[in-house]
Every structure is written in C-alpha cells, then in structure tokens.
Amino acid sequence: MRFSTSAVFSLLAVASALLAAPTVDNHHDQRIRDRRGLHDYAKKAGLLYFGSAADIPGTGEDTDLPYQAILNDTHEFGQITPTNYMKYGATEPQRNIFNFTGGDVLAGWARANNQLLRCHTLLWHTSLPSWLETGTWDNKTLISIMENHITKLIRQWGTQCYAWDVVNEAFNEDGTFRETIWYKTIGEAYIPLAFNFATKAVDSLFIPGVHKTNSPSSKPLLYYNDYNIERYNMPKSLSVGRLIRDVRSFGARIDGVGIQCHQIVGRTPTRESQRMNMQYFIDLGVDVAITELDARHQNVSAIDAAARQQQRLDYESTVGACVDVATNGKGRRKGCIGITLWDFTDKYSWVESGFGGLQGQACPWDANLKKKEWAYGGILDGLRKDRL
C-alpha cells in the first residue's frame, strides 16, 4: 500500500499524539529513561546528527504508528535516509521513465519534521531495473544513461538532500573493482564520471538565495559509500583512499566517505582501529559518516548475557570512534559528521530477512519497539565519556 505525501503528513499528527517516554527493558540505566535521545547526545558530542534509515511506505511502516512515533522523535533522530525508494530500480523502472513517489514520501516526512535528509543512492550494482541489467550497452550509451539518471535524481531532491551517496559498494574485499555493469562496460573511470555528473548537476541546480538546502555546506555533499571499510590499513580502505584522489584528479568533487558499519558482534574492529581508519580518510580532505550502523548476532539461538554485553561494547567502539574525530557539528574542520542506523528496530531490519533468521537482533530497538538497554546503552556510552 502506497500513501501520498499528504496522507503521510496527516499521519504525523496521530503519530505525535502517540509519542511517549521511551519504553525500556529495565531501569538500570537512567539515561535510557531520560527524555533526551540519541540525536541530543550526538550533538553534545560534537556530531551534526544521529539518524535512522527507514522505508515508508515500506512493508508495513506506513501504517505502523508506534514505529512512526519513534522515527518522528527528533530527540532520537535528527536525520533520515531512505532505505530503498531512491535506488535505481525504484526510481527509473523503465528507461527515462521515472517514479519518485516513494522517495517523495520520505522526503516529505523529513521536511515536515525538520530532519536532515541523506539521499541514497545514485549508482549501485544491485537493485537495478531489468531493462538496464539485461540490455546490451556500449560505453558511450551507458555513460549517457548514467548521466541522465544522476542528473534527474539530483534535480528531484538535490536541494533538500544535505548529502548524496553517489557511488555505493564499488570494491571487492581485496580492494579490486567489483565486476559490475558499470565497471565492465565503462571501466574504472565510471566512478570519477559519476562524481563529475553529480558535481555538475548540483552546481547547476543550487543557486544561493533561490534554492534552500539543509546541507551544512553551501551545496549538498557528495559521498562514496561502502561496507567493510572500518579497519585501518586494509586493502578495501586503501582503495577508497585512491578513489578520493582519482575523483579529484578528474576535476570532480567528493566531500565524504560513508562507512556503513554493518558490524558482527564479537568481530567488530577496535575503537582505535576504526578511529585511525576514519582519520586516514579525513587526512585526505573529506568528511566521514557512519551510514548504515547495526551489530548483528551470528547465532540468534545462542544469545546470552555475555553476547548482549559484547554487543554493547561493539556499539560503543564504533560510535566512540566517530566521536573521537567529530567535526564539532559546525563544519569548521573535516571529521566524522554523524551516525545513521540502518533502521532502528529489528522489526524492519534487513538482517532479520537477509540471513534466513539465523543471524539477527542487530538493532538498538527490538521487534516490539522496545529499547534494548545493552545496545542503546552502548551507543550512549560511545556518545558520552561519563557513564551514569
């Protein structure tokens, strides 16, 4: 079921009425019962935002008022990322025929709540429409298709988005280029080309004094986004560093690196390794952001008190690394700008369906929309040096 933007706005009043003090698993941590939320603590820690991804209409989110009430709580979340509705298959289901309905709904939601909108994603190797995947393309034609798609999406949402993920997940674990339709047809130049097209689209769209943007800079920021680039001095992270240099040598803009941080409980990199890795990117002249944070248990049938405590520590390590190199929320220097959960609840997490039910419970809210003291508390521990 798809709701129009106006229908979603009407839900906001109902959702706001439902908003109450956070539900918790127990009462050991006073901060969890505090009216302040993750976004409040993130700003105190020097970040611009703490946010969540969401799918609305989604698979039930559009009628789930308790879920909406939490997402609508700007004490918890000052930023929203559309999980799926701005991806290629959703926005251009047929060549040069665009559908912005789903993306418009969540963009309207963010606008109504004065939440930052982080737009995701312009180019990826999956979630592609069948016409693109099954077509036979030469270099020139596919470049034209790519430019048209990037330009149309930035024109649709560009002035509201404070940032765009321009290219998503371009590298294998060993740092080599992933064999995508873009790479196989265009070659490694597709990434600088994509950033060049995005740069031109943003520059032509944004006119100071005419268009408004929630970006902390004068124009929407352009990011490269990937997973398993949390560890310092690893092949994949080093390839992202080379990408930054290549894009700039091409004359295009790249403003940041999105570090997804889909962590595994007990296998999360140390805080120091994550901090050093973030600093590596920052020293190349870009911001970093944690863009898709969760921390999944590999065996949900074996979760005990020790596993919960480890999840707490893993959340603390990742969030704390970002705080260690925070920008102070003012954009005065490069650093870690903010953190986004890849949905805040197990109820709608990709992990629950993505691993056949064997792995899961990755989010700080459980499937009943109750805060998990250990996971939520771990985030707070990362955001605050003083523990209550």
Image (cartoon, rainbow, N blue to C red):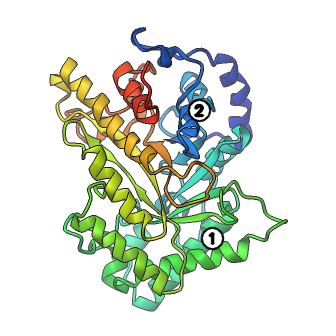
**Is residue 126 visible to us here?**
no
Q: At label 2, which amino acid type do we have? A: Asp
Q: Pointer 1: what residue?
A: 152
Q: Residue at x 37, y 32 (%)?
A: 363
Q: Residue at x 44, y 63 (%)?
A: 282
Count of marks, rendered view: 2
Per the rendering, the mark at residue 40 is: 2
Q: Quadrant of the N terminus?
A: top right
Pick out the residue farthest to the right: 209
Pick out the residue farthest to the front: 386
Q: At label 1, which amino acid type do we have? A: Lys
Question: Residue 310 falls in which quadrant of the image?
Answer: top left
Q: Residue at x 42, y 74 (%)?
A: 244
- Tell me if 215 is positioned left or right of 305 in this view: right
Question: Residue 172 falls in which quadrant of the image?
Answer: bottom left
Nearer the observer, 50 or 140: 50
Q: Secondary structure at mark 1?
A: helix
Q: Secondary structure at mark 2?
A: helix
Question: Residue 373 falls in which quadrant of the image?
Answer: top left
Q: Quadrant of the C terminus?
A: top left
Q: Residue at x 45, y 44 (%)?
A: 323
Per the rendering, the mark at residue 260 is: none
Residue 124 in the image: x percent, y percent? Answer: 40, 65
Q: Earlier in the sequence, mark 2 or mark 1?
A: 2
Q: How many C-alpha atoms fall within 10 Å of the one at disc 2: few (<14), some, or many (≥20)? A: many
